[in-house]
Amino acid sequence: MTVGMSTLKEGAVNALKRAAKASLAPFNLTISRVQPYEACTLEWVEEAQREGMAVNDYIEKDQRKPALSELESLVFPHLSKASIVCELGPGTGVYTRYLSRLITDGELHVIDSDSNAIEFLRKHLPANPAVRLYVNSGTSLPFEHRDWVDLAFCASMFTGGNLSYFCRYVDEFARVLKSGGHCVFDYFDVCTEQGWQGLQRNMARKRPIFAYAYHCTETIDKVLNSRGFRVLGRSTTGRGSVFVTAQKI
Ligand SMILES: C[S@@+](CC[C@H](N)C(=O)[O-])C[C@H]1O[C@@H](n2cnc3c(N)ncnc32)[C@H](O)[C@@H]1O
């Protein structure tokens, strides 16, 4: 019988956890895994399980994320089944599942810095040879070549993380997109009345979500324009973020 390295590693980690828990127990203390807010996958899977729902149906309902209709109005008009698409920060794949249905003859490159997210998609996304999954560093796209992607998409990615991450990924989109290619993403815009009210509501919570990032229209446009994009349009979501569509000139 052979025992894989990952089984051995898991066994060692479990033994370590048991020892740590046993030594903390007399002090009424325990250990638990800390997940950064942006690494939402495990947390959302647990929440959905508690509600007895499939995770992506739960997200669509709980987070007011009508993923298919958002894609149909903002993304699909720029795509064909042979397009090359890059999705950043898919989480549990609430949008990926629909993108994957459309892209059958092209390539759908799906990238997340959280290995749990990519592992989840590997297990649950229906098989499609056009889909490639990657765990990245959190600051760059895992491709070296330039000018080959038709569209870069992300949802609820830039609603967290600071402006440096946003600038870096816009640089990366500018690098990999073809000239004339599009990027579509959402963010919280506090220069709109709705965005401002969203910030006020978050700060009025008993426990505000400190991982949220808030930007201004002018800032987002300045970053996009300085990286060679032209903003084509904006559309507000029911959850308070704003989707931007920009085209690489
Ligand atoms: C709030 S979740 C959104 C998931 C999904 N797009 C949705 O709308 O339900 C953000 C996702 O982006 C990923 N993420 C956050 N920061 C990232 C970064 N700097 N690089 C790559 N992925 C990142 C997280 O791991 C997580 O899967």
Image: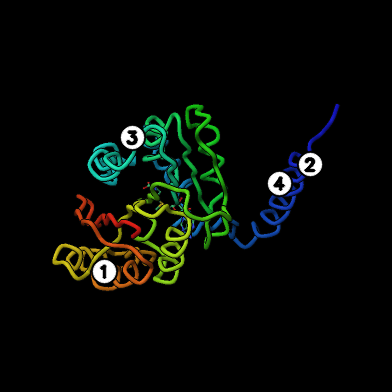
- Tell me whether the residue at label 2 lies in contact with that at label 1, contact meaning CB atoms closer than 8 angstroms: no
| Separation of residues labelled 2 and 4 (CA atoms) | 14 Å
Is residue 114 or residue 100 the one in the foreground? 100
What residue sits right under mark 3 in the picture?
Answer: 57
Q: N-terminal of the two: label 3 or label 1? A: 3
What residue sits right under mark 2 in the picture?
Answer: 5
Q: N-terminal of the two: label 3 or label 2? A: 2
- Element type at mark 2: helix
Is residue 184 or residue 19 the one in the foreground? 184
Position of 157 compared to 218: left or right?
right
- Mark toward the viewer: 3 or 1: 3
Residue 79 in sight from this viewpoint: yes
- Mark toward the viewer: 2 or 1: 2
Residue in the image at 53% along x and 60% along y:
140
What residue sits right under mark 4 in the picture?
Answer: 14
Residue 4 in percent (x, y) is at 79, 36
Disc 4 crowd rating (10 Å Cα; few below 14, some 14-19, many 20+) is few
What residue sits right under mark 1 in the picture?
Answer: 203
The disc labelled 4 sits on which kind of residue? Answer: Asn
Residue in the image at 86% along x and 26% along y:
1
